[in-house]
Amino acid sequence: MAIMSAPTTFQPILERIAEDIERTPGRGRPADYIPALAACDPRRFGMAVAEPDGTVYGVGDWREPFSTQSITKVFTLALDLAREGDALWEHVGREPSGNPFNSLVQLEYENGIPRNPFINAGALVVTDRLHTRTGDAAGELLAFLRAESGNPDLTYDEEVAASEAAHGDRNAALGHFMASYSNIDNPVPVLLEQYFRQCSVAASCADLALATGFLARHGIRADGTRLLTRSQAKQVNAVMLTCGTYDAAGDFAYRVGLPGKSGVGGGIIAVVPGRCTLCVWSPGLDERGNSVAGVAALDRFTTLTGLSVF
Ligand code: GLU
C-alpha cells in the first residue's frame, strides 16, 4: 500500500526499502571492463536521503565509499555551466543518445559534437572545458564534493584511476576524434588524466546525497552561496532525467520519475527538487550499466512516498 503523503522522516522508508531489496534475488554483475571494479560484492547495498538543510538519513552500507564514476559528470557539468553559461551548449548537446555510454558511432555524423554531457564523449568535452577554465578540473571537482558533503577526507582512488587508464583506449579514441573536430582544447593525454581522476573519486551514499543538495535547492550550495541560477539548476535536472541513466533513461523515468545519474561503480544519485536528494549504491549492474538494486530501491522510494517530479 503506497504512503502518499510526504513523510516527516525518511528513516522508516529507507529501512523498509532495504528489507525489500534484501529479499530480492538477482543483483546483476559488477562492471568488469575496469578491473579494479570487478571485485565488488554485488550484494552490498546502501541508500541515503538528504534534506535541503543537510539532515541525512541512511541504511545499509550508506557510509561505505564506492567508485563514483559517471556520477561525477553531474558535478563537472554544474561547475562548468556556472562558469561559462550557455556557450557550453555550442560544444555538447542535450538530447538522449540512445547509444551506449562509450559509443563512437554518432560522433562522426554529428561533427564531433557529442549528444549530451553524460555520455563519455560529452563528459570529456565538459571536463576539457572545465580544465581550461580552472587549470585543474579534477581538483575543482574534488574541492566541490568535499565542501558540499562536509567530508574533507574524500579523495581519488589512484588504483581505479590507473586501472582505467590502462584500459582507456575507447576514451582515448573519443578524445582524439573530437580533437580532430577542434572540440577539445587540451592535449588529449592531459584531458584523459583529468577524466580518469575525476571518475575515480570514492564517496559514500551519504557524501553524494549531500553533495547533490544544490540541485534540490535550485542552485544554492551548502554554504548558502549560489552555484547555478534557478534556471540552470532546472536544466541540469532536466538533462539528468532525459540522459542520466545511459540508454535506459526512458525506463528509469518510467519506473522512478526523478532526475537521476548512474555510474558503473553501481551508484545512482537522484533529485526531488525542493524536497530531497538521494544516493543508492549496489555494485551489480544490468546490461545497460545501471545498478539493479539501485533502480529497484529508487522505484520503491517514489512508490512509497509519492515523491516524484510527475
Ligand atoms: N570512467 C568510466 C568510463 O569512462 C565511467 C563510466 C560510467 O560510469 O559510466 O568508462
Image: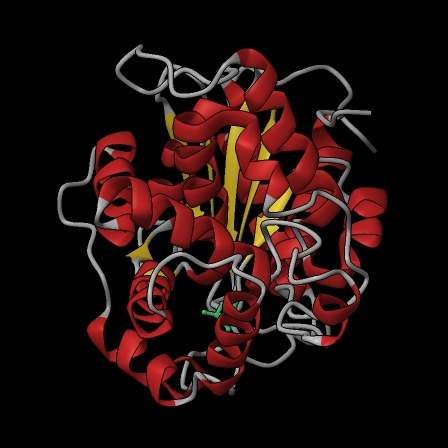
Whether residue 145 sits left or right of residue 271 in the image: it is left
Residue in the picture at 62% in, 47% down: 92
Q: Judge by depth and name the residue closer to the eye, 87 or 145.
A: 87
Residue in the picture at 44% in, 46% down: 59
Quadrant in which the N terminus appears: top right
Residue in the picture at 51% in, 31% down: 277
Whether residue 138 sits left or right of residue 209 in the image: it is left
Quadrant in which the C terminus appears: top right
Q: Judge by depth and name the residue closer to the eye, 6 or 86.
A: 86
Q: Judge by depth and name the residue closer to the eye, 193 or 53.
A: 193
Residue 151 horizontal/vertical position (percent): 19, 40
The vertical placement of 68 against 36, above or below, is above
Q: Can the viewer see residue 58 in this picture?
A: yes
The vertical placement of 143 against 54, above or below, is below
Residue in the picture at 65% in, 41% down: 240
The vertical placement of 305 against 80, above or below, is above
Residue 172 horizontal/vertical position (percent): 46, 79
Residue 292 horizontal/vertical position (percent): 67, 65
Whether residue 179 sits left or right of residue 83 in the image: it is right
Which of the 4 image quadrants contains residue 104? bottom right
Residue 68 horizontal/vertical position (percent): 41, 58
The vertical placement of 182 against 53, above or below, is below
* Number of numbered labels in the structure image: 0
Q: Can the viewer see residue 213 in this picture?
A: no
